[in-house]
């Protein structure tokens, strides 16, 4: 899947784009089912909120076939190869839960701030491409983005290791106010199967979810191969050290897997 000139221009100017209906209900259904099974497992890659609800399942592409196929899917890999002009590898992979009633906040941050400081990534030539597995509403903890904030480089940040179960380099209120005054704030919403792509320096965060509507999103963090990390400090399953370029699978690979999965369940 290739982005249009108009989409590329929107991405350059605003720092994000949202693509509706990239994955079909059949493709999303198998990911949802497998995602719930992963959250039910006791394994070090699954992090939980203090309530015990799942927060994040790291590296699911390495131990789950459906998420493995998604991690090589051309609808996700090709737009990033196009943006970076070279092959990409998987820097990080996570299924973020934002569970109904208990999903916790993600404080305001820039992803590249963390990748640079914690993993030794040289340049912001990596980014998240995210697949909605549940419907994202304005009220179930949508990702909030500060458009154009990616044009300010790495902003000052403090290492927050206590507010949530996930340590993060977070931004202070003054910085967030300045960025909002400059570019506003958006919270893209949409049906399962939508895809959100945003620049590594774009400021973003999300509020807690006190609604009965879960909000699962899979994030592939794809890095240009020449920009591989130099000084990893986090476990391999959080910041991968296999820099092998990803070869995209066939476009119908996930659909075929979903059909076999449904037949096997009959
Ligand atoms: O899933 C969310 O709400 C936020 C995730 C996020 O900001 C991140 O992984 O960097």
Image (tube, grey):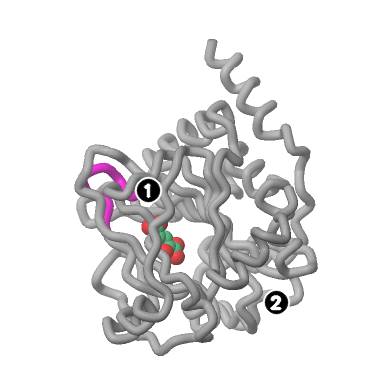
In the depicted structure, whether residue 199 falls above or below residue 36: below
Circle 1 sits in a helix, a strand or a loop, which is it? loop
Q: Write the residue at 69% across / 48% down.
A: 72
- What is the span of residues highlighted in magenta in the rendered image? 98-104
Residue 233: in sight, yes or no? no
- Position of 67 with respect to 104 (left or right) is right
Q: Is 88 in the magenta?
A: no
Q: Which residue is mark 1?
A: 97
User: Badge 2: few (under 14), some or many (20 or more) residues near its Cα, within 10 Å?
Assistant: some
Q: Which residue is mark 2?
A: 227
Q: Image quadrant for the C terminus?
A: top right
Extreme front residue here? 6
Q: Write the residue at 43% across / 75% down.
A: 183
Q: Write the residue at 55% across / 49% down.
A: 195
Relative image position of residue 102 (x, y in whole percent): 22, 49
As rendered, which of 40 and 56 lies closer to the eye?
56
Residue 61: in sight, yes or no? yes
């Amino acid at each position: 899947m290739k982005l249009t000139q108009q989409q590329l221009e929107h991405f350059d100017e605003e720092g994000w784009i949202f693509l509706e209906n990239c994955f079909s209900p059949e493709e999303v259904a198998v990911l949802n089912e497998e995602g719930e099974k992963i959250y039910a497992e006791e394994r070090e890659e699954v992090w939980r909120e203090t309530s015990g609800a799942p927060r994040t399942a790291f590296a699911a592409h390495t131990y789950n076939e459906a998420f493995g196929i998604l991690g090589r899917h051309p609808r996700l890999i090709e737009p990033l190869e196009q943006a970076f002009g070279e092959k990409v590898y998987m820097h990080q992979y996570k299924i973020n839960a934002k569970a109904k009633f208990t999903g916790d906040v993600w404080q305001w941050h820039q992803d590249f701030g963390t990748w640079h400081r914690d993993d030794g990534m040289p340049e912001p030539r990596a980014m998240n491409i995210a697949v909605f597995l549940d419907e994202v509403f304005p009220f179930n903890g949508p990702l909030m983005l500060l458009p154009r904030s990616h044009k300010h480089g790495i902003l000052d940040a403090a290492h927050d290791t206590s507010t949530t179960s996930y340590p993060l380099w977070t931004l202070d209120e003054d910085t967030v106010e300045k960025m909002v005054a400059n570019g506003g704030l958006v919270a893209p919403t949409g049906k399962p199967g939508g895809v959100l792509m945003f620049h590594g320096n774009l400021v973003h965060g999300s509020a807690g979810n006190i609604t009965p509507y879960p909000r699962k999103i899979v994030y592939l963090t794809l890095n240009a191969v020449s920009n591989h990390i130099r000084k990893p400090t986090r476990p391999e399953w959080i910041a991968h050290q296999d820099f092998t370029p990803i070869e995209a699978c066939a476009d119908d690979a996930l659909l075929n897997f979903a059909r076999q999965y449904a037949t096997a369940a009959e």
